[in-house]
């Protein structure tokens, strides 16, 4: 059997993420199920303390597998920006926001023109309550991709969801309106629910 390349491991990791997010069985090659390639790591032992994690135990295992694949891809190709991006996403999904931030920052260092990486880095900063950095990331994502509805939405969330000095209802509503006009349903629902036209 030929040795797998960095791209093979990257694609395998993407398959695990797809499996975790869609709950479908995904195959890497004919007759070779993903779960047969890397043993399933069990979710954290304290699941009974957090029912939300318990609900997603299987997804957790697939994200752990994805992390292993992306780390192998990076080992084979240390300049693989997409692998760092996806590794950051998998760490974010397994609630390891420090590692997620480190991976997204490395991905940006290798490819500073990917708006999705700035967006996901911004999401990790929001969870860590680093509002200035989150705002900067969402703004950069929008600068690189002016029609990035989710970036507008999440920027609006930061402006409306946190206390001073970041709270700015006018900017938050403006961002939600832009996201709504770009077709983002979450922003449309929020605006309608709160009596705003978009």
Image (spheres, grey):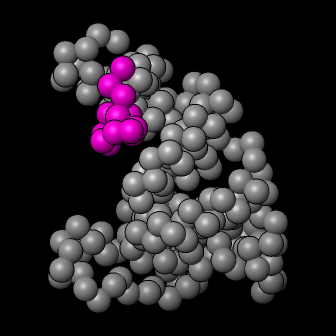
Q: Is residue 115 above or below residue 187?
A: below
> Which residue is more in the foreground, 21 or 174?
174
Q: Nearer the viewer, residue 174 or 166?
A: 166
Of all residues, the one furthest to the top in this rendering is: 197
Residue visible at 27% across and 21% down? 191
Q: Does residue 124 appear left or right of residue 12 in this picture?
A: left
The residue lying toward the viewer, choosing from 182 and 146, is 146
Residue 185 appearing in the image:
no
Residue 167 in picture, x, y percent from top left: 35, 34
Indicate the quadrant containing the C terminus: top left, top right, bottom left or bottom right: top left
160 in relation to 193, above or below:
below
| Image-quadrant location for residue 68 | bottom right
Asked which quadrant contains residue 51, the reply is bottom left
Viewer-side residue, 115 vs 139: 139
Which segment is the magenta one? 157-170
Residue 34 x, y percent position in the rendering: 54, 75
Residue 174 position (above or below residue 5)? above
Q: Residue at x 73, y 74 (%)?
A: 73
Is 135 left or right of 79, judged from the image as shown? left
- Identify the residue at horizontal 23%, vertical 67% (top origin): 52
Q: Is residue 99 visible?
A: yes
Residue 2 location (% of width, % of height)? 81, 83
Is 167 inside the magenta-drawn segment? yes
Answer left or right for 196 relative to 184: left
Left or right: 138 in relation to 126:
right
- Numbered circles on residues, count: 0
- In the displayed structure, 91 sits above or below 174; it is below
Residue at left offset 70%, top offset 58%: 107
On-image quarter of the N terminus: bottom right
Q: Is residue 91 magenta?
A: no
Residue 10 pos. (x, y %): 68, 67
């Amino acid at each position: 059997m030929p040795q797998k390349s960095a791209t093979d491991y990257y694609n395998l990791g993407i398959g695990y993420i797809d499996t975790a997010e869609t709950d479908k069985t995904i195959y890497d090659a004919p007759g070779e199920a993903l779960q047969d390639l890397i043993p399933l790591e069990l979710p954290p032992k304290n699941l009974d303390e957090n029912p939300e994690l318990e609900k997603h135990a299987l997804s957790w295992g697939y994200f752990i597998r994805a992390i292993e694949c992306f780390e192998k891809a990076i080992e084979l190709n240390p300049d693989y920006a997409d692998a760092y991006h996806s590794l950051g996403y998998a760490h974010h999904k397994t609630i390891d926001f420090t590692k997620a931030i480190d991976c997204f920052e490395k991905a940006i260092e290798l490819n500073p023109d990917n708006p999705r990486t700035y967006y996901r880095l911004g999401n990790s900063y929001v969870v860590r309550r680093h509002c200035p950095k989150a705002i900067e990331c969402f703004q950069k994502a929008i600068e690189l991709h002016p029609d990035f509805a989710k970036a507008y939405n999440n920027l609006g969330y930061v402006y409306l969801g946190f206390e001073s000095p970041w709270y700015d209802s006018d900017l938050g509503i403006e961002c939600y309106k832009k996201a709504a006009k770009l077709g983002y349903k979450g922003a449309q629902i929020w605006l309608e629910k709160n009596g705003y036209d978009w």
